[in-house]
Amino acid sequence: MGRMSRRAFAVATLSALATTRGAAAAPQRLRATTEMRGMWLATVANRDWPSGTGLTAARQRDELTALLDEAVRRRLNTVIFQVRPTADALWPSPYEPWSQYLTGTQGRDPGWDPLGTAVEEAHARGLELHAWFNPYRVAIHADPTRLVASHPARKHPDWVVGYGGKLYYNPGLPEVRAFVQEAMLDAVQKYAVDGVHFDDYFYPYPVAGQSFDDDAAYDRPGGGFATRAAWRRDNIDKLVRETAARIARIRPGTQFGISPFGVWRNASTDSRGSDTQAGVETYDDLYTDTRMWVREGWIDYIVPQLYWNIGLAAADYATLVPWWAEVARASRTKLYVGEALYKAGAPAQGAAWQDPAELSRHLTLAEKYPEVRGHVFFAAKDVAADPAGAMARVVADHYRQPANPPR
């Protein structure tokens, strides 16, 4: 099937599939709608998939397609699949080793191609598949000797910075920036992915009492930056601009999106910021000028992680949605909202999240702002299990009919 005919087929059959799986039937005559309805499918530490390391290839494939079926059942249209969680690969890459989250051993061939399969199976279901990459995280431990001997980080130890009990590539090294782009874009070259997706990890989140040791890179001649913070932001800006340009050359029409932490800067820091009191500000702590990326239209979409409830004093969802809508106004960059489905019903998350209608209220509030073009839910395991019924409530209240993703 061609691309549009696949989607048309999926929309035509979606009501029947939902009914057979116990969802409420959609109306017989459907009005086409366009909005992002996405879910993240995280693989780092086997968060969503696979359910454990060392499963057979058949079991891994079955679990993956079951999650894609769940996306269809919930009338979602996009899956954001984490394919490079820790400087590794969920496809046969000439640059980096197979991910340990497949077999339990980094570098061991799992006997199949998860990314290739995900693209094929998602498209067969009328879903878009966005490949999610983490540019700079090397390991969620601090021991380089635990990496497979052929790992680029072992071949180039000068590229690596240990920080907060983890290992990272140094974003301040041009050779690192060139390498991570080659490694990531290998997947874009090989597969018909609908999007390339970065999350919120660029420079790492701050750890009290520790500093990210990039002195040698900062001291290289020719920098010309008044502060290290400005230099770090420029490093990330370069990654974003260069990646966008290379995606456009390699696979025109493929979208490039980023999902940052939800607060750019507090208004107490910068009058242009949001009326929040967040402990982390992406501009100052992660060295990412997310507001500028949207204003300048460097990326196709942005998904700020607004993982807070309505009425939270420090970071109110009802404050941040209009702030981001204003940022996106008149920009070519589409605005979607990242939603914390994983908090629903979790006792540690506070009283607001015990109400299964909290997330549905988020979507109702966001409907007031035309700049908001949809929502992405974290994450796939929670979409499937939905222990508090929050996802079912979203579907009943807002997703009574299918929708195409924005293009």
Image: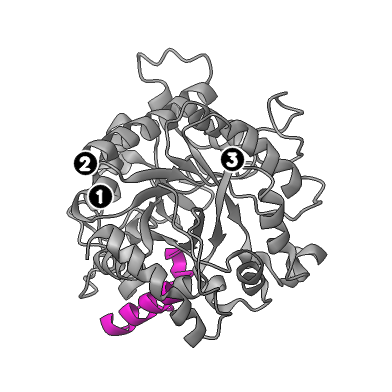
Q: Which residue is mark 2?
A: 250
Q: CA distance from mark 3 to mark 1?
A: 28 Å
* Residues marked 3 and 2 touching at CB (< 8 Å): no
Q: CA distance from mark 3 to mark 2?
A: 29 Å
Chain part drawn in magenta: 42-69
Residue type at mark 3 is Glu
Mark nearest the camera among 3 and 1 is 3
Report the number of discs. 3
Q: Is residue 122 visible?
A: no
**First-in-chain label (2 vs 1):** 1
Depicted 96 relative to depicted 371: above or below? below
Depicted 314 relative to depicted 41: above or below? above
Residue type at mark 2 is Ile
Residue 109's spot in the image, x, y percent? Answer: 21, 70
Mark nearest the camera among 3 and 2 is 3
Which secondary structure lies at badge 1? Answer: helix
Q: Is residue 153 visible?
A: yes
Residue type at mark 1 is Val
Q: Residue at x 52, y 27 (%)?
A: 295
Identify the disc placed on residue 371: 3
Which secondary structure lies at badge 2? Answer: helix
Q: Residue at x 34, y 82 (%)?
A: 62
Residue 88's spot in the image, x, y percent? Answer: 31, 57
Depicted 111 relative to depicted 37: above or below? below
**First-in-chain label (3 vs 1):** 1
* Residues marked 2 and 1 touching at CB (< 8 Å): yes
Q: Which residue is mark 1?
A: 188
Pick the front one: 73 or 175: 73
Q: CA distance from mark 2 to mark 1?
A: 7 Å
- For this orientation, the residue located farthest to the front is 29
Q: In the image, is residue 63 part of the stretch drawn in magenta?
A: yes
